[in-house]
Amino acid sequence: MDHAIALPARRITDLLSSGLRARVKSKRQAMDQPRSDPDQELVTRTQAGEASAFDDLVVKYTPRLYGLVYNMTSNHEDTNDLLQDIFAKAYKAIRGFRGKSSFYTWIHSIAVNMTLNFLKKRGRRFQLSLDDVDASIQNDKEFMEATATSSPVREADLSELQRRLNEAMMKLSEDHRAVVTMFHIQGMPHAEISKILRVSEGTVRSRLFYANRQLQNYLDEFRKNPVS
Amino acid sequence: MDEFNDNEIARLLRLKRYEQPPPGYFDNFLHEFHRRQRDELLRQPLWRICLERAHNFMLQLDVRSLASYPTAVAAMLVCAAILSLKVYQQPETARVASQSPLTLSVPVNGQQEWNLGSPVSTQIFRTQPLRSFRESAQTHRAAPPRYVLDSVPVSYEPTFRF
C-alpha cells in the first residue's frame, strides 16, 4: 500500500518537471521565431526589387534608429553619417534576409554593430554635439518630479543637466552604453536586447547593473557640484 | 536622499528621449539617403558594380553557399584550369614545308656580336616534315619537336642500296 502511494508521488513530480521543461522549451521556441513580422510585406516587396518599399522602411525606422545611434555617440553629425551607412548596408544586405528574426531585430543589430565599430575606431577622441532638448520636456511628469525632489537637478538648468548626462554616458564603455541606451532610453526589454546583441539575458542584466553603478558614481559628482 | 538611486538614474536617462534633431530632419532624411546612394553608385568602378550585381543574383537564386567571394574565386580558378588543360591537350597540326625558303645563317663570332659587315652564308634546310594529324597525335609525345636545324636535309625516303 505504501509502495502504491509512493510511486504515484514520484511519478507526479517527474511528470510535472517534464511538463514544465516542455513548456519552457516551447516558450523559448516561440520566442525565437517571430510570430508575425509587421514588416514582412515591405521586406518581401523590397527583395522583389521595389525600392519604394524600402523607402517606407526607412521612413518608419529612422526616428527610432536615430535615437539609438545618437544616444550612443552623443554627436548629431556622426549620427547622421552612421544612419546613412546603416540604411545603405541594410539595403545591400536585405536580399539575404531570410526572416529568421524580425526585421526590427535585424536592422537594430546592424545599427548597434556599426555604431559599436565606429565608436571603437573613434576611441576617446569624441566631441559632444548635442541636439536641442524639446520644449515639451517641461510638461513631462518625470521631469517635473525630478526637478521637484532632487536638488542637483532642480538647481541646474536644462542644458547643464543634458551635458552632465551625456558626459556620464560617454564615460561608460561602448558595450555598457549600448545596453543602457536600449533599456533605459529606448525602453526595450531584456529579451529583445539579448537578441540584438546576441548575448544571453544574464549578460544584459549584469551589464545594466554595472552601468548603473558607474552612472551613479559619475552623477554623484554632479550632486556634489550641481552648477559648474 | 542624497544619492542617485537606480530609479532616479533611469528617470534621468529617459529624459534623453526629448533630445531631438532639428525640425525637418526626418522629412529630409530620405531625400538625403537617395542622393548619397546615387553619388556612391556614380563613384563605384564598373567592375565593382558588376560584381555586386552578380552577388545579388546569386542571393536571389538562394544559393547562399555560392554567394561567398572565396567560393566564387575558387570556382573561377577551377574553370580556368579546366579550360587551360583542354587547350594544351589538343594536338597541334603541323604544316608541311616541302621546301623551306632560303634562310640566312650568321656565324657567331667570338664576341657574340653581329653586325652588318659580318660574312653571311646561306644554307638550304628544311623544317620538320609534315606529319598527318593522326600520326602527330600518336608520336606527339614520343618525339618532341626539334628546334635545331640540321645542316644536311633530312629525308624520309628509304635509302636504296644496291
Image (cartoon, grey):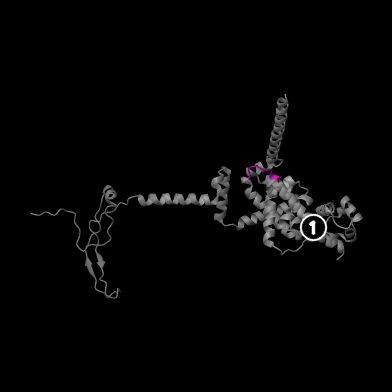
Q: Amino acid at mark 1?
A: Leu
Residue A66 image position (x, y, % from top left): 74, 53
Residue A127 position, x and y percent, is 75, 64
Tell whether A154 sits left or right of B58: right
Q: In which image quadrant can residue A6 be found?
A: top right
Q: Horizontal and vertical percent for residue A186?
A: 77, 50
Q: Quadrant of residue B35?
A: bottom right
Residue B34 in view: no
The residue lying at 65 percent from left, 44 percent from top is: A46
User: Farthest residue in the front direction?
Assistant: A2
Residue at the top extreme, as displayed: A1
- Name of the residue lying farthest toward the left: B162
Residue beneath the point at 69% across and 62% down: A122
The one of A58 and B59 positioned closer to us in this rendering: B59
In the image shown, does A178 or A78 lie closer to the viewer? A178
Chain to which mark 1 belongs: A
Along the horizontal axis of the image, is B76 left or right of B35? left
Q: Secondary structure at mark 1?
A: helix
In the rendered image, the vertical position of residue A21 relative to residue A228, given as above or below: above
Q: Position of residue A93 (x, y in %)?
A: 63, 48
Magenta region, main secondary structure: loop
Check the image and report above or below for A217 versus A92. below
Q: Residue at x 24, y 63 (%)?
A: B102
Q: Is residue A103 magenta?
A: yes
Kindly tell me whether residue B111 is visible in this rendering. Answer: yes
Q: Is residue B68 magenta?
A: no
Dot 1 corresponds to which residue?
Answer: A215
| Region in magenta | A97-104
The number of numbered badges drawn on the structure is 1
